[in-house]
Amino acid sequence: MKILHTSDWHIGRTFHTHSTLEHLGLVLDALVAVVAERGVDVVAVAGDVFDSAMPSKESYALLADTLRRLKEAGASVVMTSGNHDSATRLGFQSEWAALAGIHIVTRPEQYASPITLADEHGPVHFYGIPYLEPALIRHLHPGVMLKTHEQVLDFAMTRIRNDLVGRGGRSVVLAHCFAAGVTPATESSDVERDITAGGLDVVPLSVFDGCDYTALGHIHGRATLTPRVRYSGAPLHYSFAEAGKPRGAWLVELGADASAVEWVDLPVPRRLVVLTGDLADLLADEAFADNEGDWVKAILTDQVRPLDAMRALQTRFAHAVTLEHRPTITFEADGSTYAERIRAATSDPEIVAGFLSFVRNGVGPSEFERALVAELLNEQNAKKANA
């Protein structure tokens, strides 16, 4: 059985106020093409299908169109809700969708009842674990300690393993969590909501023992925690913290006794790049020509923050969306405070010069500014003398 593991579509998310629906649509087109070309039997989507609990009509339309085309390409779909999703909205009419082979698991009690599909080697049981927030499900199991995400998933997996004993066959688990073993290179970016706060915590890998493959969601970078426990990451870049991370899905071929896993790349409609340098260099250096069509985050190293820098950047990089000022030269005062330096000034021009130096990282007034300040002060003094 060929299974395509994907997650974290985040349909409806914006990128620095720009809609991502068009770009995500292109990536999901490519995902459908992979399903058709590689003969995928099942697409497993491990949570965060939508980006918000109240998706727009355009977001629903993209999801409906993608699911229809996945079915037309010959695949069944097993999909779970994540911490961004509204379980109720995502699961609306899921009973009817299941009749078409689109299995959407959002209710807490559903995880213990697998979706069973079969191939020439027998049944494969798909256990979809929707995002289970402890505070919202512990009342369903009085007497069981369910205060953390680890406890909740350990309880769910114990029930799954017990159920599997009676069924036999192979198994795939879908879960949306922060699992132990995620390295700094693949850890969460600024897009994923923190699900380790408020009593929720990291889930040990041992929790997922006993199944043939675990398809994880929540982390936006791909990661292999064990040969049988993996994150696919998001299909689209949603943050500059994700720049450079590959986008794609895991193609899992589940045989009778073993599985083979292959990474399948998906296209990146517009790359993300972080450019660093003086504003003048970024605008003139031909080394950056290849980045003119990218999403750009600029880190300006000018000693003084340039005026209207974003407007200037967008004359070359039309998709520049954010910038930071990190001067390579940082002015260090002589140890005295700004107030002390002002009190020590002996004239108004010195006070103005000290202020400019303070707010402009050690750069005092230019010759033009000195002349302008002198002219204004002379006019002020003349008015006082004639008063």
Image (cartoon, helix red, strand yellow):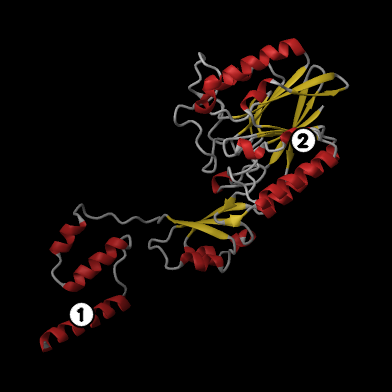
Q: Residue furthest bottom?
A: 386
* View extreme (right): residue: 120
Please give the residue where the numbered disc 2 appears in the rendered image: 96
Q: Residues within 10 Å of mark 2 (few under 14, many from 20)?
A: few
Of 305 and 28, nearer the camera is 28
Q: Which residue is mark 1?
A: 377
Q: Quadrant of residue 32?
A: top right
| Residue 16 picture quarter | bottom right
Q: Residue at 27% x, 61% y: name it.
A: 358
Q: Which one is in front, 282 or 359? A: 359
Q: Quadrant of the C terminus?
A: bottom left
- Residue type at numbered disc 1: Leu
Q: Residue 89 location, x and y as percent?
A: 64, 40
Q: Is residue 38 visible?
A: yes
Q: Is residue 245 left or right of residue 348?
A: right
**For the residue carrying disc 1, how many other residues have a C-alpha within 10 Å: few (<14), some (14-19), or many (20+)?**
some
